[in-house]
Amino acid sequence: MKDLLKLKTSISEEIESILNEQVKIEAHASALYLAMSAWCDDQGLDNAANFFAKQSDEERTHMLKIFNYISDRGGRAISPEVTNIPVDFDSFRGLFETTLEQEMFVTEQFNKIADKCMRAKDFVTFNFLQWFLEEQVEEEYVARRILEMFDVIGEEGTGRWEIDRNLVKVSYDHE
């Protein structure tokens, strides 16, 4: 039976397993950003609510890209269970600190997957991961720039609203 499975799939069990783990990470990030969006909406921070809603959509798209890749290679993609998503947050700045931490964690995970692919000589999956690794540069950059606004503007007085207003101006244009 195991030999028949090898004929069916062109992805190793190890790579399939770590990719399915990344599917879970992306799903969790999507749900986390959606919760952040709801919190911002409740606080009257419309641009931040839209920012996090967009981030949530992007993470779900990333999840599906990996999910479909596993299936396309003959593997078994697993729909993830998402738990432990907070509904309340301590501060506006804290959302973006969490965002940067999350994105740095995701970058680390993709680097680990790429390393395993190289060791397993799975160059097809390694090539597939390049898009994600490049995407992570943008994700981290944007989070850092937004945190810099907190340092420059501050949250006191109308600072929160000024930061919210300027979120739409932060972009990564290094193409």
Image (cartoon, rainbow, N blue to C red):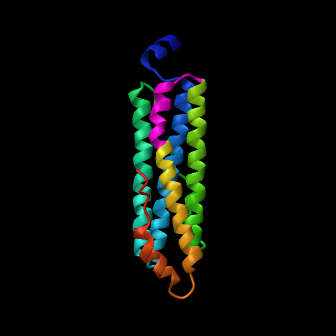
Residue at image location 57% in from the left, 27% down from the top: 118
Q: Position of residue 48 (x, y in %)?
A: 44, 70
Please say whether residue 92 is visible from this viewpoint. no
**Residue closer to the observer: 141 or 122:** 141
- Compared with 119, 63 (above or below) is below
* Residue 66, image quadrant: top left
Is 127 magenta? The answer is: yes
Q: Position of residue 124 (x, y in %)?
A: 46, 26
Q: Residue furthest front?
A: 174
- Compared with 77, 140 (above or below) is below
**Residue closer to the observer: 78 or 104:** 104
- Compared with 15, 62 (above or below) is below
Residue at image location 58% in from the left, 39% down from the top: 111
Q: What stretch of residues is rendered in magenta?
A: 120-132
Residue at image location 48% in from the left, 45% down from the top: 134
Number of numbered tags placed on the structure image: 0
Q: Position of residue 11 (x, y in %)?
A: 49, 24
- Compared with 45, 117 (above or below) is above
Is 166 magenta? The answer is: no
Q: Position of residue 68 (x, y in %)?
A: 39, 35
Q: Main secondary structure of the magenta part?
A: helix
Residue at image location 48% in from the left, 37% down from the top: 129
